[in-house]
Amino acid sequence: MRKKHLCILALSALIISCALCTDVNTYLPSLHQSAILPSIDGFGTVASNIRTEPILTLKQALETQYSLNWTELYFDESKKKALTQVYGELLSSILPVQLAYFSNPELQNNVYSVAVYLPRTGTILEFLIDMNTNRIISIDKNN
């Protein structure tokens, strides 16, 4: 009986010493690891920082009821008539939006490209925003 207790004690000591010698990080995830952002089919990864100028502009625009005043505030002056004719009906049917997911803005030739996923309708809209005026110059519906 004494040998059995000594064997259990020795085995316990061995297990405890192995556990103490092993790096804790192999068992626990890193506390400094960045969050894994969701990905949406046909859209990509959701933006981690929604405090960028183009996203803030789009967020405000999408949360506002579509109207003539809306077009004055958010459409580029030179593109307003064409955008209103092509997308006016769509925008009036979906705005205001309660929930939207934004892609990371991509800047090319002073124009931001931002995709917006609207889960209520399953719609993905691609917006081009002029960096200097912060107004929408193009919209593309991707579904």
Image (cartoon, grey):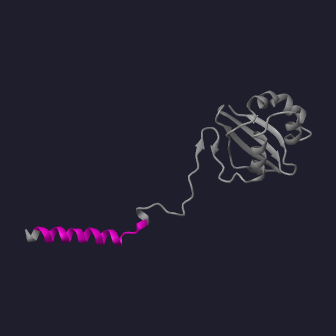
Q: Residue at x 84, y 48 (%)?
A: 134
Residue, far right:
78
The foreground one among 137 and 5 is: 5
The foreground one among 49 and 111 is: 49
Q: Position of residue 59 (x, y in %)?
A: 74, 44
Q: Residue at x 65, y 33 (%)?
A: 120
Main SS class of the magenta portion in the image = helix
Q: Residue 24, located in which quarter of the rendered image?
A: bottom left
Q: Residue 63, located in which quarter of the rendered image?
A: top right
- Number of numbered callouts drawn: 0
Q: Does 3 appear above or below 136?
A: below
Residue 85, magenta (yes or no) = no
Q: Quadrant of the C terminus?
A: top right
Q: Residue at x 29, y 72 (%)?
A: 17
Q: Residue 67, located in which quarter of the rendered image?
A: top right
Q: Position of residue 5 (x, y in %)?
A: 13, 69
The foreground one among 81 and 57 is: 57
Residue, far left:
1
Residue 7, magenta (yes or no) = yes
Residue 1 lies left or right of residue 58; in this view the side is left
Q: Position of residue 9 (x, y in %)?
A: 19, 70
Q: Does 131 appear above or below 125?
A: below
Q: Position of residue 20 (x, y in %)?
A: 34, 71
Q: Quadrant of the N terminus?
A: bottom left
- The span shown in magenta is 4-24
